Image (cartoon, grey):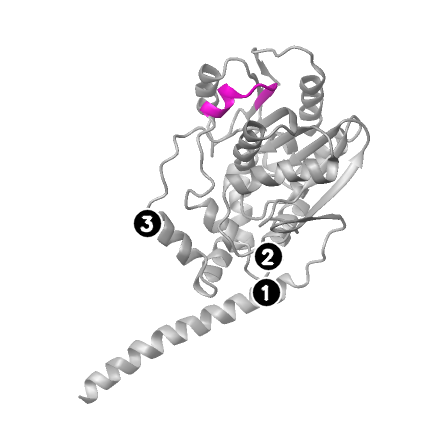
Amino acid sequence: MKKNIKLLALAVAIPAAVTAILALFNKAVDLKAAKNPEPFGSTYKWKYGNINYEVSGSGKPLMLIHSLYAGSSLYEWKKAAEKLSEFYTVYNIDLPGYGHSDKPKMTYSAFTYAALLNDFAKDVIKKPVYVIAANGSANSAIMSAKNYETIEKLMVISPQTTETELINKTDKLKCALMELPVFGTAFYNLCTTKLLMKKSIADYGFFAKENIDDDFVNECMKAAHCAKGNERYAFAALYTKYMDMDVANLLTSLNIPVAVCWGEENIHNPIKNMEKLEELAPNAQFMIFEKTRSYPHIENASEFANASKDFFESEVQNDRTADI
């Protein structure tokens, strides 16, 4: 009897102790993150919270949409935005769940961001826009262009091309666990330590390691840890198929000019996937940026801005693949 009582006490004490330790770990991360200053920007009050954005330049409106990796934010577009603002009025946006936009407790999807792009264009810009979307957000931009009429021309960087499987019970369970306040937050915090984020950026983001500066890594850390763990909701959705989609069929059915860009050395989403899209979407224009990976708009910002301008100002679609 006494042995059973001891086992029961241990069964209660061990999880409680683990929970307490993880809670302290999360608190320590929060205290460190609290030192991060909020960036200056404008605010769009959307139905799912406030959206942080910055405006620069003059001319035709152009929206820039960042990637969906942990720690992504509008800072990703800083270099290219400076170049593009010489030709366009640039709207650089933090998507909900990322950067310094609100991070509501919800399960995010490609549909969430597709709706945001449309609403932002209608409510803030109030006219049709050009859009450039990078990596994971490219899927949402393509969906927005398909479902709404606010995007006039679209450029996407390495969109997802794999066939999308239906979300199953296992995915839903994983997502629910990753959204838990203590354990989910701790898992997120462990995945987004500075050491791991810097390694991921070096391995998958950049081809030339000398192009990685401390400011970029620090901004990723700020964006990843500025909402006391609520970043875990977008993180959970991203890694449990909720943001997955196969863009091939959508691309072939778009009736607007589209350009698809790829970093030649992309590891996370290899260039062979672009070759599949070329066969399925022959009316799109394809651009390959040499000696770049996931961020051709950072590693080769000047050439990227010039190629973007050429595409947006061209009168006729060109289905030729260009190496840049």
Quick check: can you spot residue 74? yes
Amino acid type at circle 3 is Thr
**Disc 3 to disc 2: CB gap under 8 Å:** no
For disc 3, the marked residue is: 170
Q: Is residue 131 above or below residue 283?
A: below
Q: Which numbered mark, 3 or 2, is in the foreground of this view? A: 3
Q: Secondary structure at mark 2?
A: loop
Q: Amino acid at mark 1?
A: Asp
How far, Cα to Cα, is label 1 from label 2? 7 Å
Q: On the rendered image, what quadrant is the C terminus found in?
A: top right
The residue singled out by tag 2 in the image is 225
Identify the mark at residue 164; answer none if there is no mark: none
Which stretch is magenta? 248-260
Indicate yes or no whether the magenta region holds residue 304.
no
Q: Is residue 169 left or right of residue 176?
A: left
Q: Nearer the viewer, mark 1 or mark 3?
A: 3
Q: Quadrant of residue 141?
A: top right
